[in-house]
Amino acid sequence: MDALSQFFTVLALLYAVECVRWTPRSTLVLRALAVRNFRRARFSPLFGSPRAGLIWLQPLPPLGTALLVEAWPVAPSPKGLSTREPLELELAQRAPFQAQALAWEHVEQIGVRESAIEVNGREFVRCGSNRAARELAHTLEELAQAREEERAALVRRALSRAFDGGALRARVERFFALTRGLRILCNAQFVVLAVATPVAVYTWGTLWTWAPLAAVLLGLNIAITVKARRAARELTPDCPDELQRLTLSCALSPISALRALDELARPLVADLHPLSAAALAPEPDRAEILRLVAVDALYPRRVEGVAPLALECERWFSAEIVAAAARAGHDLRAAAAPPAPEDAGLWGYCPRCRRQFPVGHEVCFDCTTSIEPLSAAPDAAART
Ligand SMILES: [Zn+2]
C-alpha cells in the first residue's frame, strides 16, 4: 500500500472510532439513522463488558441523531440514600452489585467528578454522563439540606421533571431547528473528506490539489465550530464543560467536526429518564421500554445481606417511580402484565426474562427474581 492509501486508511479508522460510543448498559440510546424516526439502538453483541457496550452511530450522510438517557443509579428516600442496581435494558451479563446506603444525617458533602457523584469526598456512584451526574448531584444536595418531612415532595418533583416526555420532545424539536445549517455543513465536510479529496488526489496528484482542498476544509471546519458552539449555548446553557470539549474537538480535528451533531445531542436529554424518551420511540420499542422500567420498579431481585436502610430506600423509591410514571400517564403495572401461558402445565413466569415455569419453582435462578403467577400480575405494594 502506498503512502497516500495508508494516509486515507488511517483517516477512515479514526472516523470509525468517532462513530462508536462506549456506553453504560443502563443507558437507553434512541437512534435515528436518517434525521428523525428514532428507534432503540442495541449494544454490539461482539464488544462489551457486563457494565458497558458499544453502540454505533450513523456513519453516513445524513449522519443521524442519537439521544442518550439513563435512570437514576441511586434510590433516595426521606431517611437515606442508597445506590441501586443499573436499569437492566438487555438481558446481558450482569455485573456484580452490592447496594451501599447512607442515612442523610451522615451525608456531609456531595460533589461531582466527571460522571461520578462523590459523597463525603469518596465516589458513591457513577452515572452515564457528566450532565446526568451534575443534575442528580444537585437534587441530592437539596435532599441532604432539607428536613426529613420535606424530602418526599422534593423527590416527587425531581422525578416528575425527569419523566416529562413533553420537555424531552420540546428539546429534541429545538435541537432539529437549531442544527439544520450545521447538519448541511457536516454532510458537506463528509463529502469533501470522503469523496472529493480522494478523487482529486488520485486524479491530479497532491501538488495542485492540496491548497484548494485545505482551504475548503478549513473554511468548513471554522463554520462548523462556530455553528456548533452557538447551538450548544442555546440548547445546553448549563453544560460549560461539554461546550468546551465540543469547541476544542471541532476546532482541532476535521474528523471530530464531522460528528459535531453527536456531541451536541449527547447531553441534550441526559438529565431525563428513559420513560420520558419512550414517547419518541415506535410502538414495539415504547412498550418494551415501559416493560423494562416496570420490571425494575415492581419486581426486585432476591438479594441476601442487603442493609436494612438500602432495602428501605429501594422499596420507597420504587413505589415513587410507579407513582411518578402514573402522573406522567404511564401504567407500569399494565406494562408488566403477565404473558399468556405457553402450556397448560405452566403456572408462573419470571417478570424479567419472561421464561415460564411449572408449579414448584419460586425463583428464576438466572434473574434471581421471584416467579409470579401467569394468571394475574401481583401488586407492588402488596409485595413490599
Ligand atoms: Zn428470569
Image (cartoon, rainbow, N blue to C red):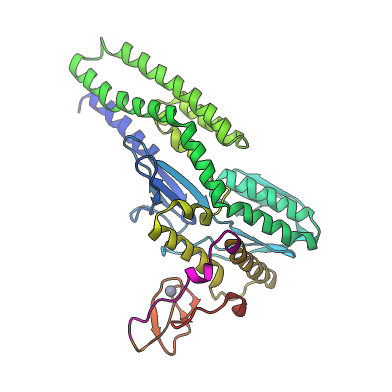
The residue sitting at 40% across, 58% down in the picture is 283
| Residue lying furthest top | 208
Instruction: Using the image, determine if residue 283 lies above or below residue 180.
Output: below
Report which quarter residue 32 is drawn in: top left
Chain part drawn in magenta: 326-343
Coordinates of residue 371 in the picture (x, y in percent): 47, 80
The residue sitting at 65% across, 71% down in the picture is 311
Q: Nearer the viewer, residue 1 or 181?
A: 181
Q: Nearer the viewer, residue 38 or 224?
A: 38
Coordinates of residue 290 in the picture (x, y in percent): 48, 62
Magenta-colored stretch includes residue 337: yes
Answer with left or right where residue 157 lies relative to residue 190. Answer: right
For the image shown, how many numbered marks are present on the structure?
0
Report which quarter residue 381 is drawn in: bottom right
> Which secondary structure type mostly characterizes the magenta part of the structure?
loop
Ligand 1 quadrant assignment: bottom left
| Residue lying furthest right | 147
The residue sitting at 40% across, 17% down in the picture is 218
The residue sitting at 59% across, 66% down in the picture is 322
Coordinates of residue 103 in the picture (x, y in percent): 74, 63
Coordinates of residue 155 in the picture (x, y in percent): 69, 58
Instruction: Using the image, determine if residue 201 lies above or below residue 148.
Output: above
Examine the rendering and report whether any part of residue 267 can be seen: no
Quadrant occupied by the N terminus: top left
Answer with left or right where residue 21 lies relative to residue 246. Answer: left
Quadrant occupied by the C terminus: bottom right
| Residue lying furthest left | 203
Examine the rendering and report whether any part of residue 217 can be seen: yes
